[in-house]
Structure formats: C-alpha cells, structure tokens
Amino acid sequence: MIFREVEDRDLIAKARRGNVDAYNVLVSRWERRVFNYLLRLVGEREDALDLSQDVFLKAYQNLRKLDDPGKFAAWLFRIAHNEAFSLLRKNRPDGELAVEPRWGEASARMYPMELSLAVEAALGRLSEDQREAVLLKIYQGFKFEEMAEILGCPVSTVKSRLYTALDLLKQTLAPVNTGGAE
Amino acid sequence: MSCSSVDLKAYLLGELPAADRVPVEKHVNSCAGCREELERLELTRSALASLGDEEPPQRIAFVSDKVFEPRWWQTVWQSGPAMGFASAALLAAAILVHAYARPAAAPVDTAQIERRIQSEVDAKLNAAVTRAVAAAEQHQNERVAQAVATAEQRFDQQYQRDLSDARQAVMYYQDRMARLTVASNNAARSNQ
C-alpha cells in the first residue's frame, strides 16, 4: 500500500510536468474503480463511460491544483461525484430513482445470480445520496472523513446517509428470521 | 455499556479505533439482540460485496496535446534535478566556449578540423538514430504483444463468467422444472 502510494505520487509528479504516458498509467490504475462507482450511481454503461472520460480529462487539466498527492483518490472521486450529480440533475430534476427495482427480496437459498439481482434492486430503491454513501464506503473503502471531502458535507451527514441506507438494505438483504416456512 | 450507546455500524465498517472496539465486542458477546443485529449487518455487507465490478467497455487513454502541455520553462522550473542538470550543462558550455575562444598558438588547417568534426558528428548522429529507431520498434512490439495478451485474457475471463452464469441458469431452471413437475403430479394425484 505504501509502495503503491509512492508510485502514484511519482506518476502524479510526472503527469504535472506534462508526461502523458505517466498519466495514462495512473488512469489505468483508477479507471475500473471510477467506472464502477459511476455505473452504480447513474445506472447506464454509456453514461458511466462518458463520465469516466470527462472525470479523467478534468483531473488531468486540474492536476496542478491538487495540493496533496496523497489525497489523489478522494480528489478524483470528488470530481466524479460532481460530474455524476451534474448529469443526474440534468436528467432527473425531480430526483427520480436512477435504477428501477427489478427483483424481490433476498433469501438464504438464492443462487449467486439471483443474489446479484436482489442487491442491484435493493441499491436501486435507495435515494441517490444514500446509494452513493454505500458505494463510497462498501465498494470503494473510503473513511468517513474522506467521504465528507468527496461529498462536500459534514461527517455527521455522511454517517446519517450511510446508516439509513444500511438499515434499508438490511430489511431486504438480511430479513429477520421469523421461523416460518421458506 | 448499553445497547443504545453501541455503534455497531461503525464497528462493522472499521471506523472505530482499536480501544473502542473491545467494549463493543464484550457487549455483543453478552447481548443476544445486538449479536443478532450485528449478524444481520454482516449478512447485508456480504450480500453487497457479492456484486462484482464490471470491466469498463473501453479503455481510457490520452494522447499528448500541446494545448495541455506546460511550457518548457515551467517544466524546467518545477524540476530540481533538471535545474541542476541545466546549470551543469551551462557550466560545461561556458568552459568549452572559453577553451575554443582562446587565441590559437599556431596556424591550423580549419577546413580539415571542420571535416573531421563533421564526420564525427555524422557518425554519432547515425548511431543515435539507429539506436532510437530500434528502441522505438522494440517498445512498440512489446506494447502490441501486451495488448494482445491482455485482450485474450479478458475474453477468456468473460467466456468463463458467461459459462458459469449459463450453468447456474440451467441448474436454476432444472430445479424449478423439477419442482413444477412434482407439484403437477401431486395435483393430478389429488384430483384422481
């Protein structure tokens, strides 16, 4: 992890001096994470890919403004967050859900494919703010403080969104065992 | 420690410092309600983690564009080693200029010297160009081979995933079919 961070710092320093190859290496390290974050947020592959390209272009153009290269991940996801919500606001000014629920509740006897569909549906039932909190914590592994930087809100707001989301997901993905038949 | 003061979600998400984790673990061991709640949260997190990442449908890469590149003086100014190298080069140039600028001790054949320098420069230039071309070709070949290998690996992984999904789907529908058949037979028997 430490070596990786040092390498990223080195790549950032080279990219800041105009080394496009160094920046492409940096992009190849982060594009999968950024793409999947955007995909689960906006729900469309084409939109997610377009947004990913915009995110990395903006990051390159503004790389000199990054004060601490050690915070590159949070800074990059802050750009991704802004791009995604800009699109979501444009497409759905009334705050409709991005991902339509497609599956019922989870059960202990689910096949992996069914479980994936149930998880997608459960995520789709969350509000965009709640879903993003889950994506940043569960799938991207950011700390609360980093999430607050990315989302531009206090840590208390981050916790509130995430905890509410987990309670809602729990009802679907880990329902209370009432002891009845399947 | 009471149930209301236990932050099970922060504990589960690794946001509690080590010192704060111990009292939570003690409480969970002695409280069935909190233990069940933590198990449900674990189950929820496991279910969420089962959703794998997708490969981006297309790789993102940038090509060099003069518009976005910094000016040469910005590049030099931001690089300590480059500044050092530039200083050393300037010093070496000054020494050379000083050496060549000194009055000659005896008349020399300048035309012959020029020809000799020209031939040496040509030889070095040709060698440098040959090396650069060879290195560029090798680099290009390596990149092509790497791209082909990556693409093959990706296709193979996708194929294996598709195969696995198809197997699961077949098993799923076979199971459903068997259940339907049993139910149908039972219904037929009860009608008789």
Image (cartoon, grey):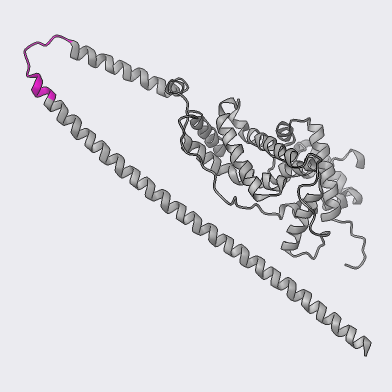
Q: Principal SS element in the magenta part? A: loop
Which x, y percent locates residue A50? Answer: 61, 43
Which residue is situated farthest in the bottom direction here?
B192
Q: Quadrant of the C terminus of chain A?
A: bottom right
Q: Residue at x 81, y 63 (%)?
A: A108
Task: Answer with left or right where residue B149 lies relative to residue A180.
Answer: left
A106 or B67, nearer to the observer = B67
Is residue A75 shown above or below A173? above
Task: Answer with left or right where residue B160 lies relative to residue A153.
Answer: left
Q: Quadrant of the N terminus of chain A?
A: top right
Which x, y percent locates residue A54? Answer: 60, 38
Magenta segment boundaries in residue numbering: B102-114
Q: Residue at x 6, y 13 (%)?
A: B107
Whether residue B8 is visible? no
Task: Answer with left or right where residue A89 lies relative to residue A62.
Answer: right
Whether residue A25 is visible? yes
Is residue A150 shown above or below A116? above
| Quadrant of the image occupied by residue A101 | bottom right
**Is B86 a magenta residue?**
no
**Is B104 a magenta residue?**
yes
Q: Residue at x 58, y 60 (%)?
A: B158
| Quadrant of the image occupied by residue A70 | top right
Task: Answer with left or right where residue B75 lies relative to residue A50.
Answer: left
A72 or A1, nearer to the observer = A72
Which x, y percent locates residue B24? Answer: 84, 42
Q: Residue at x 82, y 55 (%)?
A: A173
Callout count? 0
